[in-house]
Amino acid sequence: MRILVAEDQPKMASLLKRGLESDGYAVDVAADGEEALWYGTEWEYDAIILDVGLPYRDGFDVARLLRERERWAPVLMLTVRDSLDDRVEGLDAGADDYLTKPFEFEELLARVRALTRRRPIPRPTVMEWDDLRLDPATKTVTRGSGEIDLSPKEFALLELLMANGEVVTSRTEIIDHVWDFAYDGTSNVVDVYVRYLRNKIDRPFSRDTIETVRGQGYRLRHQGA
């Protein structure tokens, strides 16, 4: 797996590079925002570790531009700032996780492992399926003119299903994306949450959007199809 580390402090960049390489990753290092944007646009990465305080372009700007250019590698933001506003700004810019300095390298490594288990999911401004709309930035879901209140897990599950559309999403893929890497997959949690989701996005609207593919998983179907 290949990781991009965007960090302007040479000592920190060197420590991250050595630590990740010792765990089996191939690592490229960018020392500023412009270089990080070039690397992230020109090459495919399994994950990007992106410091917020980069020169020329900060990490928020780099993450936002990568998403605009349809580069979907998961992004772990590093920052010395720990305010809620900063975390929200990073996540809205397209980051997948957020780690505050100083941190233990083992924690960073665990988060990178969790991120690289996920398949990158394209995140346009608004995802649409018939009259169902999901906005990843504002975390809102609407069907027709009505807004639907979903829990964070339900939202993540619907986002994954809408990203895959008519392609079958397996239970294993759902667990990898919606639950953390420590989940052992022995319960029926996926089926329970699919039922929760159907009760909110389909049944109140007399729809049947989520289809069960026996022995394989779930997919979406268009109404009337």
Image (tube, rainbow, N blue to C red):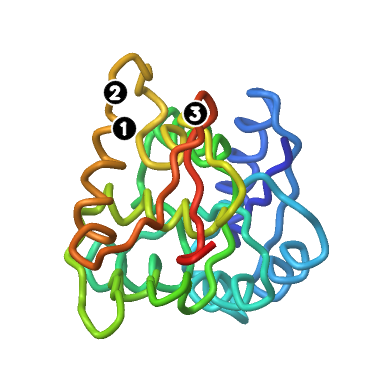
Residue at image location 31% in from the left, 65% down from the top: 87
Q: Which residue is mark 3?
A: 214
Residue at image location 59% in from the left, 58% down from the top: 7
Residue at image location 40% in from the left, 60% down from the top: 79
**Is 160 left, or right, of 29 in this rendering?**
left
Q: Which residue is mark 2?
A: 188
Q: Which mark is residue 191?
A: 1
Residue at image location 53% in from the left, 55% down from the top: 75
Callout 1–callout 3 Cβ contact below 8 Å: no
Furthest toward the right, the residue is: 42
Furthest toward the front, the residue is: 224
Vertical placement of residue 176 versus 6, above or below: above
Q: Amino acid at mark 2?
A: Asn
Q: Position of residue 9 (x, y in %)?
A: 57, 57
User: What is the CA distance from the residue labelled 3 to the residue labelled 2?
Assistant: 15 Å
Q: Amino acid at mark 3?
A: Arg
Callout 1–callout 2 Cβ contact below 8 Å: yes
Q: Amino acid at mark 1?
A: Asp
Looking at the rendered image, the disc whose residue lies closer to the viewer, 1 or 3, is 3
- Please rate how many residues cluster around mark 2, counting C-alpha atoms within 10 Å: few if below 14, some from 14 to 19, many from 20: few
Which of 93 and 37 lies nearest the eye of the viewer? 93
Describe the element under mark 2 as helix, strand or loop.
loop
